[in-house]
Structures are given as C-alpha cells and as structure tokens.
Image: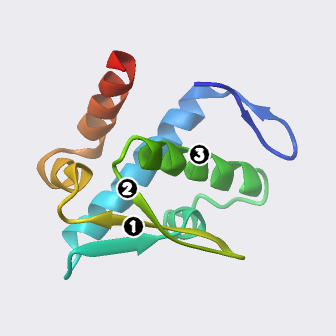
Amino acid sequence: MADIRTLSRTYVDKTDLFRIKLITLRFLREQVQNAKGNLITFRPSKVAQDLHLYGRLELRAKTVLIRTFLDDLVQRGYITIIKRSARGKVYGLYKTNKLWDMLTLYEPEKVLELLEAERIQE
C-alpha cells in the first residue's frame, strides 16, 4: 500500500495503520451484531468518534486513514457508498454482503487477516 498523504505529513506508520483497520472492523462488527435491518450506514468520522480515536493531535490523519481503508473496501466490493454530500461519503454494508458474514463468524483480527491475505493474492 502506498504511503498516505495528509495535510500535515506523509503517514507511513504501519503499526498505527494496522490498529486503525482493526478498530474500524471492531466498530463494523459491533454495528452488525446490533443491526435490526438489512443495512448499516456510517461515516469515517462516526467510526473515529465512537471509538474515541480523536485526540488533539492527528485528528485529521486518523480520519484520513479510516476513509482510505473504507475506500479500499469499496473498491474490493465489500461495502458500498450510499451517498455523497458536503459532509463526505456515507458508506453502507448490506446483510447480503460477504463482509457481513465474515464479521458475524470471525473476530476482527481474523477478518483483517483474511482481507490482507486476499489482497496479497490479487
């Protein structure tokens, strides 16, 4: 994966990127487990806010990392973009989607491992 460029610097810290992906998957798993319908929707800022990722420093960088990971999942067909607005994109995960099944069956660590293994095969 290429380095991620934010307003303040180029982000190359792989352990932090791994942690961000894992926390995002934990958020999605929690949403899937509590879902009443066939679709969950979310924004990157909501993911960061709900997981208390926001600190005074690197606020923008962490949101950019989450958005980059979500855009990667969109490209690979795991989630979809429901709406675009001035506030950004709204992402959606349908119950019929493969990622929904993975999140219900496995722990977030295993889901991330499966996603990364699939990326290597591509």
Cα distance in 3D space between marks 1 and 2: 6 Å
Determine whether, in the image, residue 65 is placed left or right of residue 121.
right
Q: Is residue 77 left or right of residue 19?
A: left
The percent position of residue 12, horizontal first and vertical second, equals 69, 27
From the image, tell me which residue sits under label 3.
68
Residue 56 lies, with reference to residue 102, above or below; the image says below
- Which quadrant of the structure image shows residue 46? bottom right
Residue occupying image coordinates x 69% and y 27%: 3
Q: Identify the element where label 3 is drawn.
A: helix
In terms of sequence position, does the residue under pointer 2 or pointer 3 come before the other? Answer: 3
Give SS at disc 1. strand
For residue 79, the mark is 2
Residue ranking furthest to the top = 121
Q: Disc 1 vs disc 2: Cβ atoms closer than 8 Å? A: yes
User: Of the residues shown, which amino acid type is indicated by label 3?
Assistant: Thr
Residue at 65% x, 25% y is 2
Against 49, residue 10 (above or below) is above
Say above or below: 48 vs 114: below
Q: Which mark is residue 92?
A: 1
In terms of depth relative to the viewer, which is nearer, 25 or 41?
41
Where is residue 35 drawn, in percent x and y? Answer: 23, 76
For the residue marked with disc 1, what is the amino acid?
Gly
For the N terminus, give its image quadrant: top right
